Image (spheres, grey):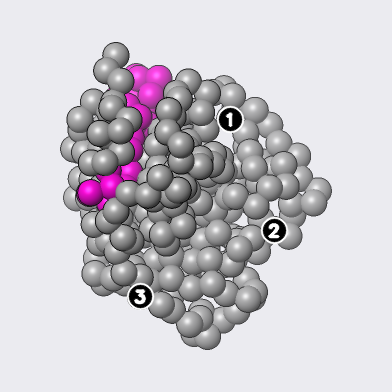
Amino acid sequence: METHWNGDKIVELLLKCGKNAIGHREKLGFELKEDGSLVTDIDRQNEAFLKQNLETDDCCFIGEETIRDCDEATVRKTLEGRCWIVDPIDGTAPYAHGFLTWGISIGYLENYRHKYGAVILPDSGEILATRNDQVIYARIPSLDIPVSDIDWTVLAPPPDAWSLGGMIMLGQRYTRYGRVPLPNPVLSSGSAVQALASVICNKAQAYIGHMKIWDVAGILPMMERLGILAILDNGTPMTCNVLGGAFDLDPKSKEFWGLADTVRIARPKALKTLNEIMPVEKT
């Protein structure tokens, strides 16, 4: 397994994808997919680049833009072995419209379990990655920096307390159909990677929303290491176990690869307080 997850190589790939995305943004157009979400040529280019550099005979590859026609047998075979799950541009809508809230994610799974992950927020120069049982963080001055020159900081778990002034990150889908009857400031960035990185780095104290498996594959191993919980509104925990019931893995379902319900993410005490002051609405 260790031969597949090479932290320096993964960060180097993220840097190259980020540089490619920023370098082509000024002349960028976009298309609408069947579900109404946006896709650009850079999504496809980055995914093809990552597939070329990560997929091997004994390690499969799942990418947001190339997984649409995957049948159930392929899903099971992919997840039960060794597998990369990537999001080449998470937050394509803000990226395509010139906003800064987007990221790129690479996650590594083995035997139905998220094991390692790394993400980059190219416009802010922030990188987060797993290193053994730690989560490391860096803010780099340039995407051209050699990986060997990156100055990493080991992240501690964010504080486990609720503040009425603390930021709550909201998913786009939730902002369309949900409501937050709280005095807290809220922000919908359009990127699960950017939003969850904010929770991990203690810029935001919670996230409420919905996502696909590739949105969170790079982040989930970090959340586990830092004691950040994720509970669906139906009571199911979202953990590093892919078969835990949080994700819909039925290829015939309209929600294929997506969460079975809205998820709330925070540290344990903060999540408990959030649920007390904003009870889950049962449907």
Q: Disc 2 marks which amino acid?
A: Ile
Q: CA distance from mark 2 to mark 1?
A: 20 Å
268 magenta-colored: yes
The label number, if any, that marks residue 22 in the structure image: 2
The label number, if any, that marks residue 37 in the structure image: 1
Q: Is residue 275 visible?
A: yes
Horizontal side, residue 185 vs residue 200: left or right: right
Residue for point 23% across, 49% down: 269
Q: Total of numbered circles in the picture?
A: 3
Residue for point 52% across, 32% down: 172
Image position of 31 with respect to 125: above or below: above
Q: Nearer the viewer, residue 55 or 104?
A: 104
Q: CA distance from mark 2 to mark 3?
A: 27 Å
Tell me which numbered mark, 1 or 3, is placed earlier along the sequence: 1
Q: Is residue 83 visible?
A: no
Report the residue marked by disc 3: 154
Horizontal side, residue 234 vs residue 180: left or right: left
Q: Dividing the picture into quarters, in which one does residue 106 lie?
A: bottom left
Locate the N terminus by quadrant: bottom left
Q: Nearer the viewer, residue 120 or 80?
A: 120
Horizontal side, residue 6 vs residue 145: left or right: left
Q: CA distance from mark 1 to mark 3?
A: 35 Å
Q: Nearer the viewer, residue 168 or 41?
A: 168
Q: Secondary structure at mark 1?
A: loop
Image position of 184 with respect to 166: above or below: above
Q: Secondary structure at mark 2?
A: helix
- Point out the stretch of residues depicted in magenta: 248-271
